[in-house]
Amino acid sequence: MRRETLRMQAAELFEQRIKPPEVARRLRVSPKSAYRWHQLWRDGGVQALSSRGPGGSRCRLSPRCLEKLAAYLDQGPAAHGWVEDQVWTAARVATLIGRKFHVSYSVSGATRLMHRLGFSPQVPARRVAERDEQAVTAWKEVTWAEVKERGRPAGATSASRTRQASPAVRPEDAPGAGEAAPLS
């Protein structure tokens, strides 16, 4: 959006017969950009400097194919051969697009496409089939509470990363309490 605004401001300055180097200085852009915008403005006016939409490559699926893909995603992974869990991962969606539409998508491209359709890729939970939830809960409540390391008391550390606290603020029983702090 900022680039669009700058181009429109540049067009106004060009209409006032201000040269590209001065436009570059005023708008704080490179002279190369100012000269390119000036050329576009001379050839096509303000319209030539307006945005042509978002950059990047266009979607490789037609609107009809996108509707079909959304319907396939609504059916769930099991309907398309993934029966081990009910999550759509980006890798699975990329594979599904390849199978159904004969179009290759990267995992990151499939993720962006899923977001565009209102879906989000899921990461399957990796859990052992024999997992005992009651034993896990008991371990967390009893054993982990005993094992977990206690944090340091608030006053035991210095706020400085380079020197210890001055002797005046050290507790009397702390190491070096009676010594002067070395100067760096």
Image (cartoon, grey):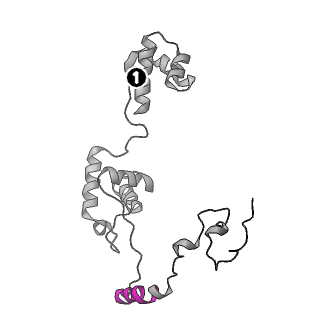
Q: Main secondary structure of the magenta part?
A: helix
x and y percentages locating residue 39 in the rendered image? 49, 17
At x 73%, y 71%, the residue is: 179
x and y percentages locating residue 113 in the rendered image? 36, 51
Q: How many marks?
A: 1
Q: Is residue 84 left or right of residue 182?
A: left
When asked about the image quadrant of residue 99, the answer is: bottom left
Q: Is residue 149 left or right of residue 47?
A: right
Seen in the picture, residue 134 relative to 7 is either above or below; the reply is below
Q: Nearer the viewer, residue 46 or 16?
A: 16
What is the magenta range? Answer: 126-144
At x 67%, y 69%, the residue is: 167
Q: Nearer the viewer, residue 127 or 174?
A: 174
- The quarter of the image holding the N terminus is top left
> Is disc 1 surrounded by few (<14), some (14 to 19) or many (20+) residues within 10 Å?
some
**Secondary structure under the numbered disc 1 in the rendered image:** helix
The residue to which callout 1 is attached is: 8
When asked about the image quadrant of residue 8, the answer is: top left
Q: Is residue 173 magenta?
A: no
- Residue 105 visible somewhere in the drawing: no
Seen in the picture, residue 118 relative to 7 is either above or below; the reply is below
x and y percentages locating residue 66 in the rendered image? 29, 49
- Residue 154 visible somewhere in the drawing: yes
Give the residue type at disc 1: Met
At x 60%, y 67%, the residue is: 158
x and y percentages locating residue 108 in the rendered image? 44, 54
At x 42%, y 37%, the residue is: 55
